[in-house]
């Protein structure tokens, strides 16, 4: 009985430590905010396999998509709606977000398809 309790407590402690260690990486949160002045940060460096969440903090809709306008094929993965798979496939509304997982290494420029003057870069290492 006592051994069982000790085992359970040990397991709980190990799980807690596991969570603490995983926390910073799991919740590192590669986030790009979109405001009326554009994407922030302008350049974001991540590792292959990580995802980036684009959060719209503006009152207008924004459409993150691979550069370059109008072909949108810089990011070399097929899919999406206007060229590359790196494409929110529509305007992201206020306080909504779009997440994309980057598996290809490289320097990827993207833009707001609804306002092609706004752009940013994701560097995947
Ligand atoms: Cu475009």
Image (cartoon, rainbow, N blue to C red):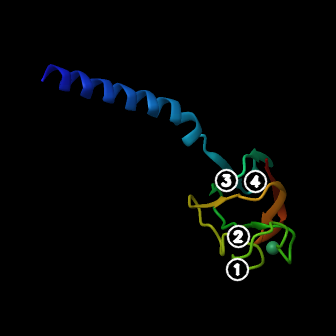
> Alpha carbon of mark 2 to alpha carbon of mark 3: how far?
17 Å
Q: Residue furthest left?
A: 1
- Select label 2 or label 3 by which is in front: 3
> Alpha carbon of mark 1 to alpha carbon of mark 2: how far?
7 Å
The reply to whether residue 27 is visible in this rendering is no
- Select label 3 or label 1 by which is in front: 3
Q: Nearer the viewer, residue 6 or 88?
A: 6
Relative to 93, say whether 20 is above or below: above
Task: State which image quarter holds ligand 1.
Answer: bottom right
In percent of width and height, residue 50 lies at 66, 51
Mark 1 or 2 closer to N-term? 1
Q: How packed is label 4: few (under 14 Cα within 10 Å), some, or many (20 or more)?
A: many
**What's the mark number on residue 81?**
1
- Number of labels in the image equals 4
> Alpha carbon of mark 3 to alpha carbon of mark 1: how far?
21 Å
- Select label 4 or label 2 by which is in front: 2
Secondary structure type for disc 4: strand
Name the residue carrying label 2.
87
Q: Name the residue rendered at 59%, 66% in the picture.
A: 93
The reply to whether residue 97 is visible in this rendering is yes
Relative to 54, say whether 125 is above or below: above
Name the residue carrying label 4.
39
């Amino acid at each position: 009985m006592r051994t069982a309790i000790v085992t359970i407590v040990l397991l709980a402690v190990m799980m807690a430590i596991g969570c603490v260690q995983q926390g910073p990486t799991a919740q590192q949160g590669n986030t790009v905010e979109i405001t009326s002045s554009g994407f922030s940060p302008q350049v974001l460096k991540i590792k292959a396999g990580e995802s980036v969440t684009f959060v719209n903090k503006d009152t207008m809709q924004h459409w993150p998509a691979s550069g370059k306008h109008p072909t949108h094929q810089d990011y070399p993965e097929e899919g999406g709606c206007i060229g590359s798979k790196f494409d929110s496939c529509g305007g992201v509304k206020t306080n909504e977000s779009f997440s994309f997982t980057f598996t290809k290494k490289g320097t990827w420029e993207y833009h707001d398809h609804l306002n092609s003057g706004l752009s940013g870069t994701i560097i995947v290492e």
